[in-house]
Amino acid sequence: MGIVKIDEELHEDVRRASAVMCRSINAQAEFWMKIGMLAEANPTLSFNDIVKMQLDAAVLQPVDAELA
C-alpha cells in the first residue's frame, strides 16, 4: 500500500462521489483508478462492458433491472 498525492479538487470530487456510491473515499478512488486502467487497456469497451467483464470475472450475476 502506498500514498498517492492528488489535487484537492479531485479529492473533493472523490469525496462527493464516495458518499453517493456508499463507498469509502479510498474505495471510490481505487474504483476510478481500476476502471481507468481497464479503459486504457481496452479502448473499444464501454464503461458498461468493463463493469460486466469485471462481474463475469468475479463469477457474479448482475441483478435483472426489471426485478430490482
Image: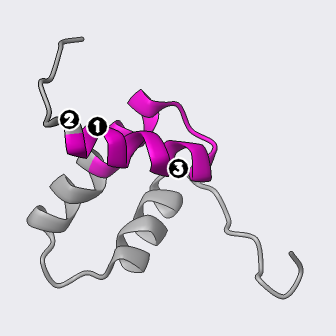
The total number of labels drawn is 3
- State which quarter of the image contains the N terminus: top left
Residue 50 rendering spot, x and y as whole percentages: 35, 69
Residue 18 rendering spot, x and y as whole percentages: 51, 43
Residue at position x 16%, y 85% in the image: 44
Contact between marks 3 and 1 (CB within 8 A): the answer is: no
Query: Is 20 in the magenta?
Result: yes
Left/right placement of residue 20 relative to residue 39 reads right
* Residue 58 image label: 3
At label 2, the amino acid type is Glu
Range of residues picked out in magenta: 9-32
| Residue that badge 2 annotates | 8
**Which SS does the magenta portion mostly show?**
helix
Left/right placement of residue 53 relative to residue 68 reads left
Residue at position x 13%, y 37% in the image: 7
Q: Residues within 10 Å of mark 1 (few under 14, many from 20)?
A: some
> Closer to the camera, 25 or 51?
25
* Residue 57 image label: none
> Closer to the camera, 12 or 49?
12
Residue 41 rendering spot, x and y as whole percentages: 10, 63
Q: Work out whether mark 3 precedes mark 2 in sequence or the reverse, and give the earlier one.
A: 2
Residue at position x 48%, y 70% in the image: 52
> Closer to the camera, 4 or 34?
4
Cα distance between the residues tagged 1 and 2: 5 Å
> Closer to the camera, 45 or 24?
24
| Residue that badge 1 annotates | 11
